[in-house]
Amino acid sequence: MTATAELFRALHHGGTPLVLPNAWDPVSARIIAEAGYPAVATSSGAVARVLGYDDGQLTPPAEMFTAVARIVRAVDVPVTADMEAGYGLPAKEFVDRLLETGAVGCNLEDSVGGQLTDPARQADYLAEVRAAAGADLVINARIDTFVRPGADQAGAVDDAVRRGREYRRAGADCVYPIMAPTDQLTAVVEGVGGPVNAHAAPGGPTAAELVGAGATRISYGASLHKHLMDSLRELLPTLA
């Protein structure tokens, strides 16, 4: 497990940006791996909807862990799992259950129900996850400053940088200021001083644009699943 995690960790520091289209089931994971991507990330929102739930920590943890395990079994590349805010699980239990799936990374966000978690409390949780996992998990700490309701965009960069620095000190390998505007992303990257994940989407900021702003890891969240479901909605009326 540690060797695979270290392989995945190294991809955050190579000369080529790490691009991670997000999967939601074994089929989508296989397609991503077969396309040549070096790792697979899951999307908690997309997985939740496939399982019949809405996003926002509404999926029973057992079902999410089982879904992640199925994806891991389907591919021969490292898998990192989007686990929302940890589903309220104690850090040790969370780590033990995630490692049982075979995943070597996790995405953990710092808001629940649209409310930002106190950064010190979130840093403490991340530190507990790091202590429990050792080197076996690559931790991507999501920063929800830019997506919380009524976000103060003027102070968002400073808040994201403060949170990013705290999460890095707590043991996060990478931080993820999700939906940070491209024109503000560079300031976050420079302020954090470590690997930064950015969010791309079909019709939105491209991976190339985000890399140009300093991101070293690019993921797509639930946007690919949404894009395909929108295509299906458009197709269905033509089939009758």
Image (cartoon, rainbow, N blue to C red):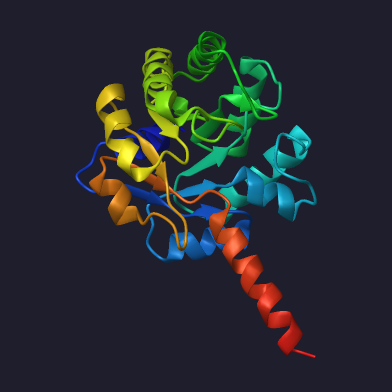
Q: Quadrant of the C terminus?
A: bottom right
What residue is drawn where x is 33% and y is 37%? 185
Quadrant of the rendered image containing residue 239: bottom right
89 left or right, relative to 169: right
Decide if residue 193 is in sight here: no
Is residue 109 left or right of 35 when viewed as pictured? right
Measured as percent of width and height from the top left, residue 8 is found at: 37, 39
Residue 127 drawn at (x, y percent): 49, 12
Closest to the observer: 99 or 107? 107
Report x, y in % for residue 93.
Answer: 67, 19
- Judge whether residue 117 can be spotted in this image: yes
Image quadrant assignment for residue 228: bottom right
Q: Residue furthest left?
A: 15
**In the rendered image, the vertical position of residue 125 relative to residue 39, given as above or below:** above
At x 29%, y 55%, the residue is: 208
How many marks the image carries: the answer is: 0
In-front residue for pair 126/101: 126
Q: Position of residue 154 (x, y in %)?
A: 41, 27
Q: Quadrant of residue 194?
A: top left
